[in-house]
Image (tube, coloured by chain):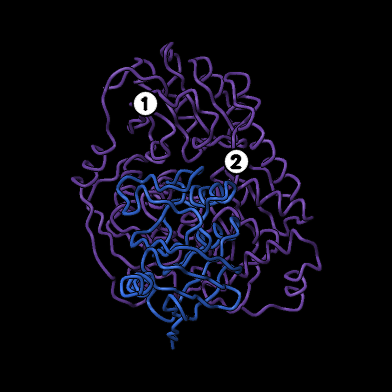
Amino acid sequence: MYLTKEEERIFNGELGEGTQKAMELLVAIGDAYDAERLIPITRAHAASSGQEGDMYFVELLAKGGASCRVPTTTNPVYDMEYFHSIFEIPEKEAEVARRVKEGYKQIGAILSWCCTPYITENIPLYGEHVAFSESSATPYVNSVIGARTNREAAQSALAAGVIGKTPKYGLQLKENRKGTLLVKVEATLKDEFDFTLLGQYVGKQIGYGIPVFTGMSRRPATEELINLCAMLNTSGAVPMFHIPGFTVEAQTVEDAFQGDVPEGKIAVTDKELKQTYEELQGASGKIDFVMLGCPHYTLKQVEEVARLLRGKKIHDDVSFWVCTSATAKFLAERNGYVEVIEKAGGHVVPDTCIDEPCWHPYRHKVGVTDSPKCAYYRRFKEAVVIRLKNCVDAAIKGEWG
Amino acid sequence: MPRLKENGDESLEITLKCHKIIGGYGQGEALVSNEPICFYLTDPKTGIVREKSHELAGKNLANKVLVFPSGKASSVVQIDGLYKLASNNVAPKAMIVKDVETVLVVSAFIAKVPLVDRLEKDPFEVIRTGDFVKVDAEKGLVRIAKQEVRRNRDVTS
């Protein structure tokens, strides 16, 4: 890959070891894809995770004197103070989380600790070149916003944030952003949960690819698109999609395929969604927890939980959790939603991901969630996936089914 | 073109050019997987593959030269998985891959495992589990000492 004089100097370590390591990683990725050069980016999102590999890399860069050149947000780890007041967290785990948080602070990242920064703290514009890791973030930024990102790892996104550049390859290039597969939606998509099922089914069917959806009879809402993105890129490896007429980059199906013929076609009817739903079911019976907010709930979703819980009481044996961003929690407090949820016996917690060691007390417990992504992490004995309204009903009754 | 070389007393050695992704040198016994690999689904202390349905289930990745088509699974688990193997000194010594993607590059970078692709011959045809393989990513060369040849010689001598 061609490097400018300044990039060469960084690569040779003249500007410190931290930026050198970041540049080395970008060059390795560029070489892997035969990228001709680096291109500037405007922003990045590092899917920090509070795991050891994550800690190693952020410390390597931060201690080597690197700092972010473009706004770079962070993914949730967990809100330690909140959890420490409720559960015991093993010292070794807590130490990793502390060091990860310190590392991202030292490197000058925006400490959003949120997995949906693209709707609040870090919003690209159409056509911007960016580096966004995190399963829902990559497809959302590419498809809904029309900014350009590859399917980044936390570390490649952080390295890009530090250098302010990314190799010119993959989805940074228009010709690679064309659809590969036509998905005819014949199913009725009533609510957010139907979009979750659609994403789960299509991702599993196609693995890697860029689906083009037709047949949607209405404009999907923000939360519906977030769920679709999260599941397409969890059950599959889908970094982008088009919904001609609704997403920005293609107005027609022809545009979406850039004049090419689709490699394949599938249809999704109510039957496939029903089957997908059934596969996510487990035994009915008593539950120990309800887990919501994977991806992080928006303010609107927190409001909906509050509306469903107003004047109700969550069963004594059930722990009820809503994960959201610090921004949404702040506004939810101001609007009184948090008070309603807490009065009913639930928690609203910011900065926290469902795939974190803070949840270890539930390792052998059974619960419900509205997110297959939450169930996928296998942090629990069992997490049955049902609609939000059913989750709230189960919380009140103490059992599902 | 690959060069065949009678290596004096015991083995037939094949040298192939390759494309460096992560630099360095590593050598060891080859372990060939036709299926994609998720490093998170190995025992971080030993390097033994724990994924029950995987063709390498029960086999050990530690100190091997791993030949596989691609990585799989989410970036967080894949990277953390290989990093943990490396921290416990049970990572592969080098990796030869067919379809590389960003997450695998990052994983190898963080774990400091040499990673190469684009061998001038299909690695799945040339390399068998048990061959002794030297990966010199810096020079862009892979040397393969064929196990069958060694064995045949043992039989005839």
Mark 1 and mark 2 on one chain? yes
Position of the N terminus of chain B by quadrant: bottom left
Q: Position of residue B56 (x, y in %)?
A: 35, 53
Mark 1 highlights which residue? A391
Name the secondary structure under disc 2: loop
As rendered, which of A129 and B126 lies closer to the eye? Answer: B126
Give me the chain that's blue.
B
Q: Amino acid at mark 2?
A: Gly
**Residue located at (59% from left, 21% from top):** A88
Left or right of residue A160: residue A11: right
- The residue furthest top is A316
Q: CA distance from mark 1 to mark 2?
A: 28 Å
- The residue furthest front is B157
Instruction: Tell me, for residue A163, which label it has, or none.
Output: none
Query: Mark 2 Cα within 10 Å, few/some/many (few <14, many 20+)?
Result: many
As rendered, which of B37 and B10 lies closer to the eye? Answer: B10
Between disc 1 and disc 2, the foreground one is 2
Position of the C terminus of chain B by quadrant: bottom left
Give me the chain that's purple.
A
Name the secondary structure under disc 1: helix
Left or right of residue A81: residue B105: left
Instruction: Tell me, for residue A50, which label it has, or none.
Output: 2
**Residue located at (77% from left, 51% from top):** A63
Above or below, A67 against A25 in this view is above
As rendered, which of B149 and A317 lies closer to the eye? Answer: B149
Q: Position of residue A361 (x, y in %)?
A: 49, 23
User: Is there any visible trace of residue A168 in the rendered image?
Assistant: no
Q: Chain of mark 2?
A: A
Q: Amino acid at mark 1?
A: Cys
As rendered, which of A357 and A120 lies closer to the eye? Answer: A357
